[in-house]
């Protein structure tokens, strides 16, 4: 573990965003006072093509892990994966803190824990409007509208001032679940005084496009009416509000819904357990769908971000047993593209189009089939008008969104604006806010059977193999450094061994190895490290001269006893 060399001052309030600043996902924030620490959110992110075999990433918790005995609690603002998903994987490393969240979030977390074999996590359900005392912090939960039920903003009360941590929110006038954002409570807290607002930056650069989820439901129903064949709709699995809208729209046009993807089934089960979506009765099984015919069914799929192993990607590749999309079918993307996922999504779309499947997204539809769960510029201005913060710290977005959010704050006359990096240690009080230092941070990669740092040498080498291929050389030398057998060369990802003109590449390289060995001094030949280094350098140069790139080369040298 890397030491951060940060020693907090007594009677100083700090914010340390360790994830979610300058990126989407992996939201992970720490508040510190008197060397006691409160964690807010612990989420996952989506991996891109630079991390082979990796679908999701986690925040690197080393800063918090080094202080695990001083963590007073972990609060999760809502049930989206980018705020919740890393909790089961990092909870033990964080010292097994008590977890505080609203009911829907708690029930989903319990389900995820059960799948991972975690049975002893202390989860406290806190209702919107209620408070918890986590000395030296008091935390008030505030209901906000979002695309998943029971979402909460937090007022974090301290002796040095109150912080409003917004979580994800928007001002939907007719949300799918629950009430509108509790603006009267926010105004009251503003009257009492808000030292700092730490808030969602996702749409800060976009003027108001305040579509309600009810508007989306109507737009999706209109889109369904224009389609005669099989319909598949892909969404973020955790967008329970959109799942409700799709089911209602399908019911309106006389279709039933089939859920494809374990995470969607989990979300529906938890929603019903918490009293949501009980009025929806048009979900059927895949087997039942066959009897009804394609014009009577809507498939709801995971995979809106092009995730390799999600349902839509597998169907588009023709790899999902029992589910096919073909000519005459339509796939609707009712989700925004998270920056960084464009390549993966385009690959899925191209696969669908190759199968003559029609693809509709929010930009190509004549109807409103998507609404963001995050505040636009005008909504953020309303929030600032209610709470009137002394300090604004933008989080939850890439650098462009953070800067847009900062500009909104400045336009509204906010006195202090601090734009953080991941790992920034921000002093909030006393005195003027400032970034006083930076501590180590980063992300972890979740592989099929292990979790490693995204800087892990294995990942770096695997990434190189993606682009340049590999060559493996095996040598058997006697103690004088002479070949005791013919060298063996195997290349991967460099040539086509079945192609005319390339079929002799490995044997040609074996001859090249013999020539290089012949030019080496006897002392070098008796040193396996020197043999490997000289061969690696020379062979890389040979391949680069022929193909324009340098492959990964490994040389294994063995010596006989005579």
Image: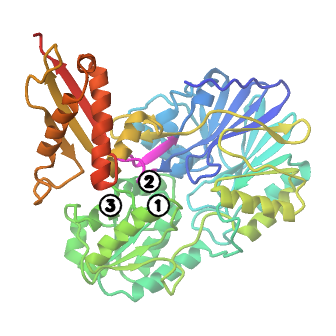
Query: Splitting the image into 4 quarters, where does residue 71 fall?
Result: top right
Q: Which structural element holds mark 1?
A: loop
Q: Which residue is mark 2?
A: 48
Q: Is residue 240 magenta?
A: no
Disc 1 to disc 2: CB gap under 8 Å: yes
For residue 311, the mark is 3
Q: Residue furthest left?
A: 485
Q: Nearer the viewer, residue 181 or 409?
A: 409
- The percent coordinates of residue 501 (x first, y second) are 12, 58
Residue occupying image coordinates x 86% and y 48% = 194
Point 44% across, 47% down: residue = 56
Q: Position of residue 523 (x, y in %)?
A: 27, 16
In the image, residue 226 above or below residue 95 = below
Q: Residue 137 lies in what quarter of the image?
A: top right
Query: Which is closer to the viewer, label 3 or label 1?
Result: 1
Q: Which residues are magenta?
A: 47-58
Relative placement, left or right, of 539 versus 268 is: left
Q: Quadrant of residue 186?
A: bottom right
Q: Indicate the quadrant containing the C terminus: top left, top right, bottom left or bottom right.
A: top left
The residue labelled by disc 1 is: 341
Indicate the secondary structure of the residue bearing disc 2: loop
């Amino acid at each position: 573990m890397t030491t951060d060399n940060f020693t907090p001052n007594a009677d100083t309030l700090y914010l340390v965003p360790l994830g979610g600043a300058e990126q989407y996902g992996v939201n992970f924030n720490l508040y510190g006072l008197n060397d006691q620490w409160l964690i807010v959110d612990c989420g996952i992110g989506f991996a891109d093509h630079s991390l082979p075999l990796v679908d999701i990433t986690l925040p690197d918790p080393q800063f918090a892990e080094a202080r695990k005995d001083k963590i007073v609690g972990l609060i999760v603002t809502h049930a989206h994966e980018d705020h919740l998903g890393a909790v089961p994987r990092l909870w033990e490393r964080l010292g097994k803190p008590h977890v505080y969240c609203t009911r829907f979030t708690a029930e989903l977390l319990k389900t995820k824990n059960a799948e991972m074999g975690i049975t002893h996590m202390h989860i406290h359900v806190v209702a919107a409007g209620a408070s918890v005392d986590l000395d030296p912090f008091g935390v008030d939960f505030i209901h906000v509208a979002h695309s998943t039920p029971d979402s909460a903003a937090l007022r974090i009360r301290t002796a040095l001032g109150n912080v409003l941590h917004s979580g994800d929110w928007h001002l939907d006038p007719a949300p799918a679940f629950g009430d509108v954002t509790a603006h009267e409570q926010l105004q009251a807290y503003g009257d009492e005084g808000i030292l700092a607002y730490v808030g969602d930056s996702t749409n800060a650069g976009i003027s108001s496009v305040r579509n309600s989820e009810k508007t989306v439901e109507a737009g999706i129903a209109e889109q369904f009416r224009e389609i005669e064949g099989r319909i598949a709709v892909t969404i973020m699995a955790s967008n329970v509000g959109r799942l409700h809208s799709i089911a209602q729209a399908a019911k309106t046009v006389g279709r039933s819904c089939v859920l494809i993807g374990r995470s969607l089934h989990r979300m529906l089960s938890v929603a019903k357990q918490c009293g949501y979506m009980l009025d929806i009765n048009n979900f059927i099984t895949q087997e039942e769908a066959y009897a009804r015919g394609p014009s009577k069914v809507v498939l709801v799929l995971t995979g809106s971000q092009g995730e390799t192993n999600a349902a839509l990607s597998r169907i588009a590749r023709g790899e999902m047993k029992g589910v096919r999309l073909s000519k005459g079918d339509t796939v609707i993307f009712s989700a925004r593209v998270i920056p960084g996922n464009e390549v993966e999504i385009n690959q899925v779309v191209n696969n669908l189009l190759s199968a003559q499947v029609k693809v509709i997204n929010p930009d190509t539809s004549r109807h409103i089939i998507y609404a963001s769960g995050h505040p636009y510029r005008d909504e953020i201005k309303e929030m600032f008008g209610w709470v009137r913060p002394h300090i604004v710290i933008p989080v939850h977005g890439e650098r462009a969104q953070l800067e847009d959010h900062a500009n909104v704050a400045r336009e509204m006359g906010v006195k202090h604006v601090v734009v953080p990096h991941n790992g920034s240690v921000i002093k909030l009080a006393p005195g003027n806010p400032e970034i006083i230092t930076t501590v180590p941070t980063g992300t972890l990669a979740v592989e099929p059977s292990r979790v490693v740092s995204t800087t892990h040498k294995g990942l770096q080498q695997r990434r190189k193999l993606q682009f340049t291929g590999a060559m493996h050389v095996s040598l058997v030398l006697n103690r004088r450094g002479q070949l005791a057998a013919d060298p063996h060369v195997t290349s991967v990802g460099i040539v086509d061994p079945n192609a005319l003109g390339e079929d002799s590449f490995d044997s040609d390289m074996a001859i090249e190895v013999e020539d290089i060995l012949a030019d080496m001094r006897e002392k070098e030949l008796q040193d396996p490290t020197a043999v490997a280094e000289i061969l690696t350098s020379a062979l890389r140069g040979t391949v680069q001269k022929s193909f324009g790139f340098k492959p990964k080369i490994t040389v294994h040298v063995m010596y006989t006893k005579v």
